[in-house]
Image (cartoon, rainbow, N blue to C red):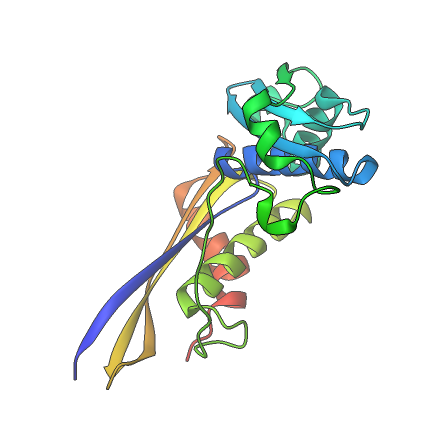
Amino acid sequence: METFLFTSESVNEGHPDKLCDQISDAVLDACLTQDPDSKVACETCTKTNMVMVFGEITTKANVDYEKIVRDTCRTIGFVSDDVGLDADNCKVLVNIEQQSPDIAQGVHGHFSKRPEEIGAGDQGHMFGYATDETPELMPLTHVLATKLGAKLTEVRKNGTCAWLRPDGKTQVTIEYFNDKGAMVPIRVHTVLISTQHDETVTNDEIAADLKEHVIKPVIPEK
């Protein structure tokens, strides 16, 4: 029987990559809520106790970018220096400009141009495919990694594992059987959870809590 291992990874809401994504998304949502015709190219970066939002935005919306940054950080759980970011006291840098004339010429004109004549600026397109491996129509590795991340956030916010901090990452490896081209999952081979935590908890406590409150509720025995 021919088998192989496949791994998927998921990052939690407090991971720097995800934090930045959520801030940029919140800026976009704020612009579109007030002005559905907004053109937003917003980037976010973060380092210890600092967040910077920059890019090119053309909108009629009146947006408080700094408030969006602080509200997003606070909602995630970054509320003190000891977790690496304090939403109320961190440094927030905002450098937003109007879109350049060249880009604006290509992406505007939705009232006067046909849809196929309107450009999208320098944007990427992500694509994928559905699989009947799970009810979610996604690979089982991805589904389990994402559910583990969601459970990790849940037990942090409801106090079950009070030692948890916002940043975290989950990874699941599954052994598959190649059945004439159909990839059939056999078993979960490896579960990896990397998470931010306070200094008072031991490795043994971390392992026991994660197994009991995160892994067991998500990963079935069979």
Horizontal side of 128 relative to 19 (left or right) equals left
Whole-percent x, y for residue 118 in the image: 60, 43
Specify whether residue 160 is in view.
no
Decide if residue 185 is on the left or right side of residue 125: left
User: For residue 20, what is the image quadrant?
Assistant: top right
Nearer to us in this view, 204 or 135: 135
Give left or right: position of 155 versus 200: right
Q: Quadrant of residue 175?
A: bottom left
* Horizontal and vertical percent position of residue 144: 47, 64
> What is the quadrant of the C terminus in the image?
bottom left
Q: What is the quadrant of residue 40 in the picture?
A: top right
Between 37 and 90, the residue placed more toward the observer is 37
Q: Closer to the camera, 124 or 10?
A: 124
Outermost left residue? 1
Residue at horizontal 16 percent and vertical 84 percent from the top: 1
- Residue 53 versus residue 208 in the image, above or below: above
Find residue 72 and report its horizontal and vertical position in percent: 69, 33
Residue 124 drawn above or below residue 60: below
Front residue of 22 and 217: 22
Q: Position of residue 151 (x, y in %)?
A: 57, 56
User: Which residue lies at the image location 57% right of the left edge and 19% below the top edge?
Assistant: 52
The image shows a total of numbered marks equal to: 0
Q: Is residue 8 something that shows in the picture? A: yes
